[in-house]
Image: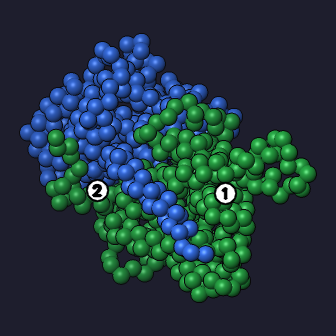
Amino acid sequence: MTQVQHGGSPGNSRRSGGGRGGDRVMVPEADFESYYGRQIVKPAPWEHDIAIYLFTGGVAAGSSLLAAGADLTGRPALRRVARFGSLTSLLVSVGALVHDLGKPSRFLNMLRVAKPTSPMSVGTWILSLHGPFAGLAAVAEIAEMLPARWKRGPVRLLLALGRPAGIVGALTAPPVAAYTGVLLSDTATPAWHSAYKEIPFVFCGSAAAASGGLGLLGAPVAEAGPARAFAVGGALVELATEQQMEKSMGLSAETLHQGRPGRLMKASKALTVAGALGALVGRRNRVVSAVSGAALMVGSLCTRVGVYEAGIASAKDPKYTVVPQRERVDRGEPVRYRS
Amino acid sequence: MTGPNSFFGPIDPAPDAGYEDPPARKGFFTDTSVCIGCKACEVACKEWNDVPENLFAMLGTSYDNSHSLNANQWRHVAFIERPAESKPLVSLGMPTVGATPTELPEEEKPDFRWLMSSDVCKHCTHAACLDVCPTGSLFRSEFGTVVVQDDICNGCGYCVAACPYGVIDRRKGPEGDPKVGIAQKCTLCYDRLTDGQTPSCAQACPTESIQYGDVEELRARAEERLAALHERGVSEARLYGNDPEDGVGGTGAFFLLLDEPEVYGLPPDPVVTTKDLPEMWTRAAVAAVAMLAGAAASFLRRR
């Protein structure tokens, strides 16, 4: 039998009531009706590019902040790590974003309009503002490494521009980390939309933990103090707000505990806690600091991929769309406009 | 132009989008109680809009082999077979051949109930797909409908995740189709509307299950039909999407259903995601400021 599939996505056919068996559950499965168990909302048609981008965007934003701080407080080694971290993650981010388009050759169509109702449009403009300044600061860092006899003319101008560019890059960095939370939650994807109150805080905390982790990984302990403080603070914010987020999410929070996203979130928690403790305990030890920094970075990556995959899972199962809506209708509280 | 109800609440979408003196809002009233599942709408839509093949497979889900609304399926007829209810069948005023079901002896009556419904893009008053589109490819037409401009869409896929009904999708194939990679959905036959024509699905519908017209007038017609059915004892009949105060501000394409919406694969209480967008931006701004302050504080400690 030929099966050609170009538009639709026949998933597993499950009868209403959800799948029985498989994972052992403590509470009975919510009973609900659906059309042959098929999804209602569609999952975002994105590859893991976007999950990677959530991580690299966070590293880029946090690194720009650390780079400017290191520059202003005379920490050249930390500044170098942070500026290179920022440029590298920006390049990976842009690559991932363009690759994920259905028509990559039309990437520039993003710049046709500026739409506050579209987090993707806002994000494009935020990146277009932040990217060149952070990039210029990183190029100035490369110029810094040139032999002294080359530091003349345009190279000197570049060196002089490093600090102001870095400061503008730092001031425009936090929106890069924060808007990705809105990017996910401004969808009909149950696990993303229901997390909208806390997700920007989780993502900003995760960004601080990852970029601070990069600083710990790359800079000597004598200069890594601010990276350590930023990383530990970020880890605490991420852990605390993630708990709160799960409470707000209601039913769809369970997608953060099942299957692969569940394992990723568990790993994220363990790595973030271990990384933060290691960063505090090992503040005089280069190796312990570096290992802790790496743990914080991987922990942040796990958070991003975990939240991303939980959203996709929540869209594919009609339960997360139907049950919360059916419950509010049955309570007599459907969403209605009241002037 | 933009007003207090631009994100949520009753509004006439075309003037809100900036049209001066637009024509009356156009839409569909799909009365599923007279749908016979002939799929003429699916075929007419594919023919007129040159929508390529979708799926050739026996899905084992009653007579539904076109699966779902997606980039290559702009009308989708759902088939639901249910055990018959014990109450007597009522005439829905359909043309019949031979004996009408109510005159059959009890043992010859069908032991199941068949629900059929032709689903389509809802052309929401508050359309999430249009709100989140970063290129301006999706736009509000003068008829109050929501249409993709094929030559502008860059296939970011954001609209796919934003639609509360799971209608719009990115076209995956067939290979070589010029619209592969970009978002596709029902246009309410924009090219026919501009010529004063009826959309192809409504034109082809043999039972007038799909009715096209001015949304205001269709809403009144739907209320009349609902009242008539209730009077005849079809208490399960209900309207879906006709309320301008619902989560999407009412839909341009709405339905008369004979069971709960989720039975047909429709969300029971859809809400446009951008209803919460102002609060999302506020919270993101607070998080961003906190991050900046946290970074500054990290450098304040003594060396």
Q: Is residue A123 visible?
A: yes
Mark 1 and mark 2 on one chain: yes
Give whichever of discs 1 and 2 has the lower sequence position: 1
Callout 2 amino acid: Gln
Mark number for residue A86?
1
Question: Residue drawn at (45%, 32%), measured in percent from left and top?
Answer: B186
Q: In the figure, what tint was chain A given?
A: green
Q: Judge whether B86 appears above or below B2 on screen.
A: below
Q: Residue at x 46, y 56 (%)?
A: B288
Q: Position of residue B100 (x, y in %)?
A: 20, 38
Please give the residue where the numbered disc 2 appears in the rendered image. A325
Out of A183 and B300, give the one closest to the viewer.
B300
Q: Which amino acid does label 1 sit on?
A: Ser
Label 2 CA crowd tier, 10 Å (few <14, some 14–19, many 20+): many
Asked if residue B42 lies left or right of residue A85, the reply is left
| Residue B37 in which image quadrant | top left
| SS under mark 2 | helix
Q: Tell me the colour chain B is drawn in.
A: blue
